[in-house]
Amino acid sequence: MSALTSRSAGRIRGRNGTKATKPDPVVAGVRWLDERLGVAKGGRTLLDKIFPDHWSFLLGEIALYSFVVLIATGIFVSLYFIPSAKELIYHGPYVPLRGSRVSAAFESTVNLSFGVRSGLVIRQMHHWAADVFVGSIAVHMCRIFFTGAFRKPRELNWMIGITLLILALTNGFIGYSLPDDLVSGTGLRIMFSIVLSIPVVGSYLATFLFGGNFPGDGSIIPRLFILHVLVVPLIIFGLLGAHLGLLVRQKHTQFPGHGRTEKNVVGSPMYPTFIAKTTGFLFVTTGVLWALGGLAQINPIWQFGQYEPYKISYAVQPDWYMGWLDGALRIMPPISWTLWGHTIPFVILFPAVLFPGICFNLFYVWPMVEAKVTGDRAEHNLLDRPRDKPRRTAIGVASLTFFFVLFAASSTDVLANYFKVSLNEVLWFFRFAVFVIPSAAGIFAYYLCREMSGVPGIGRRKRAVVITRTAQGEYESVSTAPRPGDEADHEELLPTPVPARIELNGELESVEAAGSGVRRIPRP
Amino acid sequence: MSDGTDVTSGNGAPAGVPITKFDDPHLQPYAKNPRRAEMLIGAILLIGLAGFCAYGGLYWVGGQTQWEAVFGGIGFFAFGFGLSAWGKYLLPQGPFVEDRHDLKSTEPEIEAMAAAIEDRGKMVFRRRGFLGTILGAGAGVMGVVITFPLIRSLGPQPKKTFDTTNWRSGSHVVDLDGRRIHRADLEVGGSLTVFPEGHQGSGVDQTMLIRADTKDITTLPGRDTWGPKGYLAYSKMCTHAGCPVGLYQQVAQQLLCPCHQSLFDVLTGGNPVFGPAPRPLPQLPLEIDSQGFLLAQAGYDQPVGPGFWERS
C-alpha cells in the first residue's frame, strides 16, 4: 500500500516539473512499444479519434456488443452441447421427458438448461442476443440508409454491412436448428425443401448436405454445428474487423450543424470520454440481455419435444428475422411449372431463393444506383436529414413496410385465430396488402418529407410566444428569447485546438509538438 | 503556448484560435457541481457492485433462474450505466474537432499504380500467352476439382430417393407402434398417422389415414377401389414444403399444413383448396385383406412431398 502511494506520488511530482526520481512507467511502456512497433504517432491519433455524439450512432454499437455477448455465451453453451443426432433415452432432471427417445443434441440442450447452474440463463441469453444482434443490424442499416451514410466514400463499408446482415441471419437460423427440437426440425424440413427446389442441382445439393433424403443420416447436426461455431463466426469476425477498420480510416459521418463541415469531425475523443461511454454501453447491453435471458423465456425446447419427421405443432413460426421469408412462402400463389419432364417448384423457388437473392442484391448495389440516378458522385461526410431526401426516404419507408407486411404475413394463422376471421380472407388480404400498403406508405412518406422540408424552422426547438393584454384590451404577442443551444443562438465559431495530453495540473504541451489534429469548438 | 490565444500551425487550423486545457471545467457538463454527479454515479456503480455480489452469492447457494437474471442483469446494467454516466457527465465532452484528411491519392499516383499493374501484367500474360493460358486453365480445373471433396463427398447422390417410398403392393398399414390397422379401428371421422410395416416413424412414408362416410366421397376416375369402407390414405408430406399435413379438420373434411397453411380437401382426392400448395396430396390405394387388416394395393403413383427438378 505504502509502496503504491510513494510510486504514484513520484509520478505526480515528475509531471509537476520537479526532477523525477524514477522514469514515468507509462512513458517507459510507450517507449518500449514504440521502439519495436512505432505506436506513438498512430496511437496518439487513435486516442484523439473523434466520435460524433448522436444517439443513432449507438445502434451499430448494440450490434457489436450483442456479438460480443454471443461469442461469450456461445463459448459457454458449446461446452455442454453435443452436436450429434445419436438416439438415446432421456434420464435427465426434466421429469416429463424421462424415458422418451431423444437425440444427443436435444438431450444435451435440455441438460444445459436444467442441469447446469446458470445454464438456462446463459442459453436463453445466447438466443436473445442472436435476436437482438440481427435486429440491431437491421436498425443500424436503416440509420445508414435514411441518412445517406452509404454514399461515397463508404460504399464498400455498406456492402460489408449487408454481408454481415446475411451472415447474421444465416448463423441465427443455423443455431436455431441445432437443438433438434420439434420447431427447429420443422425449420430444417422447410430448408431442405427450399434447397430441393433449386433447378437442376437442387436434389443433389439437398442429399449431399443432409446425407440422403430428409432427415438424412444424422450428419446435418454436426455439419451445422461446425458452421455455427467456427466457419460463420470467423467470417463475421473478419468482416467486423474490416467494418470497423474502414470506419477508422474513413472517419465517422456526422449530422450537419454548428461548426461541422465536410472536412472535419466534431464530437468527443476516443480516450477517455468515448471509451468510458461505450464500455459502459457494453455492460448495459449485457445487463439487458442477461435480464432477458432469465426473465423472458425463449425457445423452451422441452415443451416442443424431440423432432420427429411425422410430428408437427400448431402456430409454427420461425425466429423473427426469418419471418419475412416465411410470410413470402405463405402468400405465394401456388405456381409450379412442369416443362419437358422437369418440375420447377416456383412456389418455393421464388419466395425462398430468388426473392431474398433479389433483395440482398438490391441492397448491395443501392449506393451505385442512387449515385447513377441522382448523378451525385461527390464525397459525403455530412449526413442527410431524411426529410431532405424525399425520394430516398420514400423508397426506404416503402421497403421497410414491405418487409414488415411480409413479416406479419408469417402469422396468418395466428391473426386469423385472434381476430376470428377466416384464414382464407387473411391470406387474400396479405396477397394484396403486400403491394398496396408499402406503396401507400412510400407515397405518404414522400409527401410528408416534402411538407416537412418546406416548413421554416423545422428541426429547431419551438419558442414560446407570450401574449399579453393591455389595459385598453389590445393583445400583443412577444416571442421569448431563444434557449441556449438553439440553432438561432449559434454563430459559426472557429474550431480551437485541444490540449495534447490529459493532465490535472501540468503545463499544456504545444500543439505543434504533439502534432494533434484535435481541436475544440467553444460552446456558446 | 499556454496563454490561451496562441496561433497554431501545421494542422490546417485557422489562426487566432484559443487553446484550452483538456480538463477545462467548462468542457464538463457537471464540472460546476461535480459532487452531485459523483455521488449519483457512485451510488449507481454501488448498485452494480451489489448486483454482482448478489449474483455470486446466489450462485453459491444453488442458483435460481429468475433471481440470477435479476441480480446479474442489475449488476451489468447499473455498472454500465454508471460508467456511461461518468463518461457523459464528468469527462470532457468538447465538442472537439478533428480534421479529415483526404484519402485520395494524386492523379499521377493513381496512374502510376495502374501503369505498374498493366505493364508488369503484360510481361506475365501478353508476352507469354501460352503460359498464361495454361496457368488459367490449371486454375480453372483446380477450382472445379477442389469442390469435389467439399461438396460431392458430403452425401449420396439422390438417384431415385425422391421418387419412391417404402409403400409396396401388400404393405400392411401400421401405426407408430407397429400395430396393424384393422378395418374396425377407426370410426367415421377418425384419423391416424400410419406407416408401411417395418418403417414406423419414417418421414417419406408417413401417411394420413382418414375414415370418411362413403357417400360423401367424390371418387376420382381410376380410384374407384382405393378407399375401401371409406378409408382414405394420403401422403402426410405437404406438396408445398414437405411439412407434415398434421391438422385434420373433421367438420370441413380438410387437412391443414401448419407450416404455411395449405389446405387439402379429403373427400375430393386430396385436392389443394387453399394456400400455396401446388399439387394434390398423393393418395395411397388401400385394400382390406381377408382378416380385415388394411394394406396397400400398390405404392404411391407419384413422388410424395415438395417439387423438385427431376419430378416429371
Image (cartoon, coloured by chain):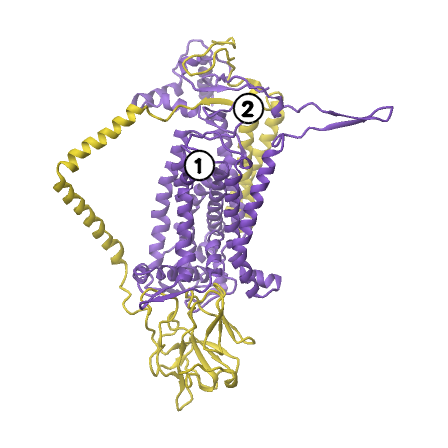
Chain colours: A purple, B yellow
Residue A410 location in percent, x, y? 51, 58
Q: Is residue A361 visible from the viewing direction of this image?
A: yes
Q: Is label 1 in a helix, a strand or a loop?
A: loop
Looking at the image, residue A6 sits to the left or right of residue A451; the answer is left
* Three-letter code for the amino acid on which mark 2 is drawn: His
Q: Is label 2 in a helix, a strand or a loop?
A: loop
- Give a yes or no on whether discs 1 and 2 share a subunit: yes
* Label 2 CA crowd tier, 10 Å (few <14, some 14–19, many 20+): some
Q: Is residue A150 above or below residue A437?
A: above
Between B114 and B46, the residue placed more toward the observer is B114
Residue A134 location in percent, x, y? 46, 46
* Label 1 CA crowd tier, 10 Å (few <14, some 14–19, many 20+): many
Indicate the quadrant where residue B201 lies. Answer: bottom left
Q: Residue at x 37, y 50 (%)?
A: A228
Q: Are marks 1 and 2 in contact (CB under 8 Å)?
A: no
Q: Is residue B72 visible from the viewing direction of this image?
A: no
Q: Which residue is mark 2?
A: A258
Q: Which residue is mark 1?
A: A150
Mark toward the start of the polypeptide (1 vs 2): 1
